[in-house]
Image (tube, coloured by chain):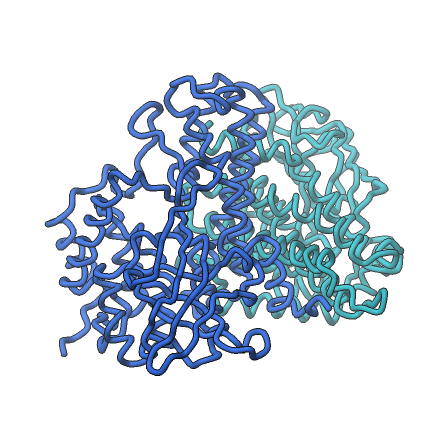
Chain colours: A cyan, B blue
Amino acid sequence: MTAELVPSEDERALAETVRDVLTDLSPIAQVRADFDSEAGYAATAWKALAGDVGLCGLLVPEQHGGLGLSWSAANVVHHELGRALYPGPFLATSLATTALLAAGAEAAVPSVAAGETVATVALADRRGNWTGEGVTATESGGAWRLTGRRWHVIAGSAADLVVVLARTPAGDALFVVEPGAAGRTSAPMTGMDLTRRLATLDLAETPATLLGEPGGAAPLLAVVGRHLRLALAAEAAGGLDWCAGTCVEYAKTRQQFGRIIGSYQAVAHACVELYGAARSAHAAARWAAVAAENGAGEADLASHVAALRAGEDYRVQTEAGVHLLGGIGFTWEHDMHLYYRRARAAGTLVGGAAAHRLAVADLAGL
Amino acid sequence: MSERPSLEEFTAAARAWLAERYPVAAADTGKRRFVWGEGSDEIRVFAEPDPSSEADAVDAIRAWRAGLWEAGYGWITGPTEYGGAGLPAAYQRAFEQVSRQFDVPGDASLTIGLGMIAPTILQHGTEEQKQRYLPALYRGEKIACQLFSEPGAGSDLASISTRAVRDGDVWRISGQKVWTSGAHLSDIGEIICRTSPEPRHKNLTAFLVDMHAPGVTVRPLRQMTGGAAFNEVFLDDVVVPDTDRLGEVGEGWTIAITTLANERNSLGSSSFGGVGILSTDRLAGLVRHQGLDDDPAVRQQFGEVVSHLRAARYVNEVVGAQARAGRPPGAEIGLSKIALSDNLRRLGDFVSELLGPEVAADTGEWGTYAWSSLVLGAPGFRLGGGTDEILKNTVAQRVLGLPRPS
């Protein structure tokens, strides 16, 4: 079945289920409690989403214990999670699953799909580049060991299983590092985005399993990269949806100079731009997800367009949102800054705007 | 009455009908592969016809419509009692798709009549008006224009001062309209006039005026591009029979809104009148021709512009899919028109940087100074069919529910 631009009945039902769970178990008060907690997310909501709803197996084929759903279903899920700033390790886990499936390493997948094993990917150097440099992979008697450091690892402190990018003599490759592997430590990074924890991962002669061939990282990274772009674009659309709703509501009730501020054209137009950004971010994320699902020729291009435009809109419009809310928007108590933080940090996870612009130029035939 | 053909049968018959009459378009998609230096390098934001060849082009369009009408493709979704084929919208889309594979004249000078005025007549016209005008419009026998804006009533359309005064069975209309696309080709005009001293929005009435009637004077209006896509229309005691009144006396504002909603839908979505502008291949060709394709800063600018063009297309496709699923767009479709205006400005800025002095003065090189008409035309696109500001006000009030400015 081909995916459609308008979400199917099943996709709408899935989105509603996710939204209901988040409303019940991860309202913003819980999210705020989470970021002061040790783990960074609460076990109850994670158990409901990963175990009961089965989100971790969303894109995993049924024979490997997943739901066997599509990129277009993932689109509506990421939208809802982004809208609620859900802090659990869903994105990390789904990226790792995508890497494992792309590499044909199905054995590790069922326990991740079941939500029993939290997984993540550790791909970046200190500057955020996805390069094997910094982690050395050495082989002895068919067994690989990794030594070095990865940075900016999403849910790095919570993860059991980690897919690591390292440098072999034959070039960059991905490896699986199991929970409790020798020489493996991680440390949380103090970060701008309070609702998505990053960590460093240190490896010292840590045993690891090679995924695919030595030097074979590129095609796997391409799939993971596209997944990340689609996910972050959908999250941005969800976040913008919250921002537009919140700011418009405020503009309808707040009075100054004896007038509702939404009756001032400057304020009304700022609200319209925020609403328009939510609308176009949603369309770009949706279009790109459907293109990925249907194997459209423009799928990669569309994923960069979606990540770039939704990401830039998220960044610009969360700042506009703080401004629309006035002084209250600049307080710790108001939730607006949590979205502003998310937007600023998320844009750096996918290579940044300049990388997308260059990729669009390449893929559009320049 | 015959059985409705299946979509496949209908499409096959349409393809056969087209193939018998029109050459196949250069590429199967109807979109020619861009080759630098080949063919016309024309670029236009607005249709600014060359007066010497315009009459021939209009004749070809009329003949195309007449042929469509005879074959039953003239008004595919129209009610059968007015000569339509009474088929669902999917048949119309299928016909448009298949006709893109052939080199057909298209509907250029009829888009206002077919896209804005005919739907208004269908919604608000009398039985007699529908019988008289709808087949004539779809058959290409009559061309229609829209007589709304005035020198003193642009964004504030409700403040028009052209008057219609009742005189027995007729009305006498005097005043001046402006920005009237296609008035010089038109047979009928949908005009909004002031008919009473009632309060705003209740004092207007719509009519269908015969553009060949005594007292109607049409003058081309030269705009900043140098071309003339629009006209001024002067009405001096023009007599219109009461049977050509569209809707009730005092109902003109509602009718104007219907027509403007039709306009917004056609402007925002696909039927952009511009020529040669939104081709990524052509833009890439220009970058290469200027020898800037290895410049990382230029590559980034190119990627930025292309990402905006694609994103706008994705929005329109999602809007189209939602409409087919039974959720047609509301006032927010105005945002698509704003996005297009923004993209024209981005494109104009980018090509200007690529071309430097070659966009300011014609060196005779193919495909370079041609872009100057985008640079000169883009500011106008932000005005027609509702300024950015008016469109945003409409979204603020109708979609977001924000209060009107007090």
B332 vs A190: above or below = below
**As drawn, is B333 to the left or to the right of B62?**
right
Near-viewer residue (B193 or B247): B193
Image x and y of residue A354, in percent: 63, 32
B12 or A154, which is in the foreground?
Answer: B12
Please indicate whether residue A173 sits to the left or right of residue A267 in the image.
left
Q: Position of residue B2 (x, y in %)?
A: 13, 76
Name the residue at the left extreme.
B20
Front residue (pair A263, A100): A263
The answer to which image quadrant residue A296 occupies is top left
- A329 w.r.t. A166: above or below: below
What residue do we see at 29% from left, 76% from top?
B129
Tell me residue A249's x, y (percent). Answer: 74, 67
Image side of residue B207 versus residue A327, left or right: left
Residue B268 in percent (x, y) is at: 47, 55
Q: Quadrant of the N terminus of chain B?
A: bottom left
Q: Residue at x 80, y 53 (%)?
A: A322
Decide if residue A66 is in sight here: no
Q: Quadrant of the C terminus of chain B?
A: bottom right
Residue at x 34% of width, y 67% of height: B209
Residues B349 and B320: in front is: B349
- Whether residue B11 is visible: yes
